[in-house]
Image (cartoon, grey):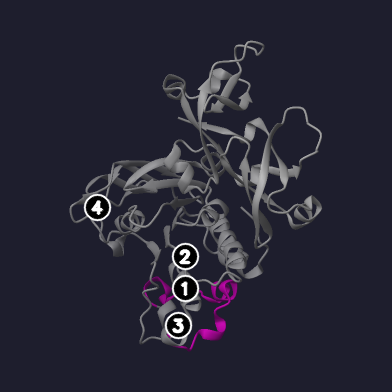
Amino acid sequence: MAALTHPAATAFAARSRPGAADLVLRGLQWGVGAWRSSPADLHLAEGQTLALLGHNGAGKSALLDTLAGFLPARAGSLHLGGRELTHLPPEQRRIGYMFQRDALFPHWTVRRNLRFGRGAQAPLDALIDALDIGPWLDLLPGQLSGGQRQRVALARALVGAPDLLLLDEPFSAIDPESRPALRLTVAELLRQRGRPTVLVTHDPTDARLLGDQVGVLDNGRLLQTGLAQTVFERPADLRTARLTGVDNLWPLELLEPADAAPADMLRLGLNGQTVLVLPGRASAPPNALAARRCTVAVRAEHLQALRADTPPQDDAIDLDAELIDARCEGALWRLRCVLRCGLQAQAFALPAAWRSLDVRAGDALLLRLRPQDLHLLP
């Protein structure tokens, strides 16, 4: 997570340190109406941020409402700093909550919204400066844009140093130009404030940049939780890989080793033709070996696009490909290609690398990756 040396953010964080504590879920189940989640166990250390990633309807917001006390827990328990919160009303939990819809009082000015509840006696200057909301203090929420209201809602959730912070899609109304800078400011506030935070998002970029831990939630079930790098680079299953934005998911067959190949080599192919040969047959998922099929997961940023005549490199895997098209996505070019076996592949290239390739649709390319950047899913 990137550090930001913002004086106002540092000043606010320095006032926010005391009273931080771990968040622990033990078999917690939550639900709305007849729908109920699977039991969830979680330990979030003080100062850590858990980014919950999932599509609409996964149960992310319902979990936040349960942590806040707006929905009753269906089973299990919730602890914060050794204090059980499971049956406490919301006003006794000392939780800051930024709702998906800003939920500001429309007839109050921004200043009065910030002074509500915990903010009545809390110092506000450093927080106002960090989030750059000073010019709007005497305006009503209806006079602000959606992104401005979201900044105010974030400030209101942070004010008064709550023991736990809940953020529901904090950047959904922020315009694309402002989002990277605000992410950095929020990352610094969360990193230095010393309290656990649960952030809900459907955007893998938010989860990757802000989450110390990442949890992947699908239909009320935590598919995987762990360090952000582990979850993104080693997803536990196909559903998790899709939710974390893995661009290349290639369904391949496990072929018998070639006569001249070592017995521990893993040969993967399509329609009987070899596509990949990997060392370490024993590292393949056991159920994949039994089923004779697996999915190869490769993130687009781990594929390097090279000219077709590039010499081979030791300890690298080269795949012959043909360029379908290339599109600029902000700071990177996304290259959509087709492999010789017929599977599609996507790779990213920096602008300078894309220019140096000097290729067009229909031209041959070489896609190179390291074996450690390839992950096998059953």
Q: Position of residue 233 (x, y in %)?
A: 56, 40
* Rendered position, 324 above or below 233: below
Identify the image quadrant of residue 343. top right
SS under mark 3: helix
Residue at (33, 42) in percent of width and height: 40
Residue 39 or 332: which is nearer the viewer? 332
Pointer 1 and pointer 4: residues touching (CB < 8 Å)? no
Residue identifier under label 4: 31
Residue 127 part of the magenta-drawn span:
yes
Under mark 1, the amino acid is Gln
Question: CA separation, marks 1 and 4?
Answer: 26 Å
Q: Position of residue 127 (x, y in %)?
A: 54, 72
What mark, if any, has residue 369 been given in the picture?
none
Residue at (58, 21) in percent of width and height: 266
Residue 372 or 356: which is nearer the viewer? 356
SS under mark 4: strand
Residue identifier under label 3: 110
Under mark 3, the amino acid is Val
Q: Position of residue 290 (x, y in %)?
A: 42, 19
Q: Earlier in the sequence, mark 2 or mark 3?
A: 3
Residue identifier under label 2: 170
Bounds of the magenta span? 116-140
